Image (spheres, grey):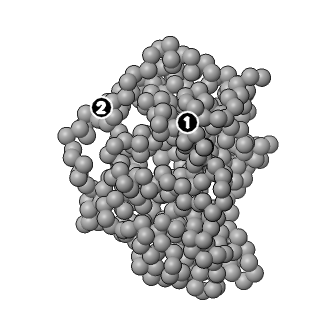
Amino acid sequence: MKASIHSLYILALFVLMGCSKQERSEEDNSEINGKTYLWMKPSTVKYPKLSKAYVNDKKASVERFCDKYFRNENNSVSLLVAKNGQIIYERYQGTADKNEGTKITADTPLHIASVSKVFTATAVMLLVDKGKIELDQKVSSILPEFPFQDITIRNLLNHRSGLRNYAYFVEDKGVWDLHQTLTNQDILDLFTEKEIKCDCPADTRFCYCNTNYAMLALVIEKVTGMKYPEAMKTMIFDPLEMHDTYVFDYNKDRQTAVPSYKGNMMEIGLDHLDAVYGDKNIYSTPRDILKFDLARNAPTFLNPKLKAEMYKGYSNEHKGEKNYGLGMRMIEWKSGQKFYFHNGWWHGSTSSYISLVKDNVTIIALSNKFTRNTYAVRKLAPLFGDYPFKFDDEE
């Protein structure tokens, strides 16, 4: 189907979703295990329709870019560029499963790796907004087994907890049998059983660490009374009609999930870390992530004060442009312009999710065959605003 038809489809979908939700008040809730929690609401914002000339101009530029970075069918990619919720350009190409002989399509869920952290953070912020937990609440008050008394929910979200990366400490001698599959609960238990220490005191420095989001997944489970996959489905995926998005279940999905590959198309098998979620393990499509991005940027997502906390940089001990908010990377230029994004890499899967909030632009690129070109999509940002990247669309 052509991109223009896709654009009309998405636009119509959001109008219909908006009409169906319009009469709901901002206090509408979902019952979860006898408790009331806030659902994520689809966007009902009516953005101006893009002119045909505007769409054609941007589409041509994006296509030139893609023809350079993803020039043939051997380059696996699932890519979407949208403005005002209207899809300007899509490209789906490459192998989904070599053994099955399937190709990547618009409906093929790919592993989004650390872009999963944005979803985990969003679920946590929804619970904060509803008053079920507090940003500066001690993690140990929710997870009694958690031995580090100074670490807060905010410290986990902004990677200032000082926790060690579980991928590394399980390889220490005597800590874990690497033939056994690790779970989130195992990580929590190992802190005490193996006396795992922190790398530094809480809130003293930024250190990007997957353990933070593995613990946040357990927080979500404790507060909602549901396992993380079910909580994400109930709070985010189902309300936003993200029908091709799911959390990977190691026992149920390992035979059917789209595999990942090295650059030479050698399949990368699963290992002892593949059952841990929260930091990774969400599979999705660009169209579904677009729905998510529109909902995150809608006025109905969080109260303004809490939303400002999410997009504030917390790592200022070293001067520079790069920073991290609550579940989102950012670049802050001296001009005042900000660039919000999150990248991911797990096995052979790479991902990039860019939200140009001020310009109502969403850029998403996913691949299940290892390539760093996925991250190059940030060079598309100058097409839509004052972002000091070099737009590189020439051969």
Give residue 271's quadrant in the image. Answer: bottom right
Residue 293 visible in the current orientation: yes
Residue 380: x, y in percent? Answer: 62, 31
Q: Is residue 43 above or below residue 347?
A: above
Classify the position of the C terminus by image quarter: top right
* Residue type for callout 2: Leu
Front residue of 298/315: it is 315
Q: Is residue 47 above or below residue 190?
A: above
Q: Residue furthest right?
A: 264
Front residue of 77/361: it is 361
Nearest to viewer (mark 1 / mark 2): 1
Q: Earlier in the sequence, mark 1 or mark 2?
A: 2
Q: Which residue is mark 1?
A: 363
Residue 241: x, y in percent? Answer: 38, 42
Residue 76: x, y in percent? Answer: 68, 36
Give residue 198's quadrant in the image. Answer: bottom right
Q: Is residue 297 left or right of residue 162?
A: left
Q: Is residue 115 above or below residue 395?
A: below
Q: Is residue 316 left or right of residue 3?
A: right
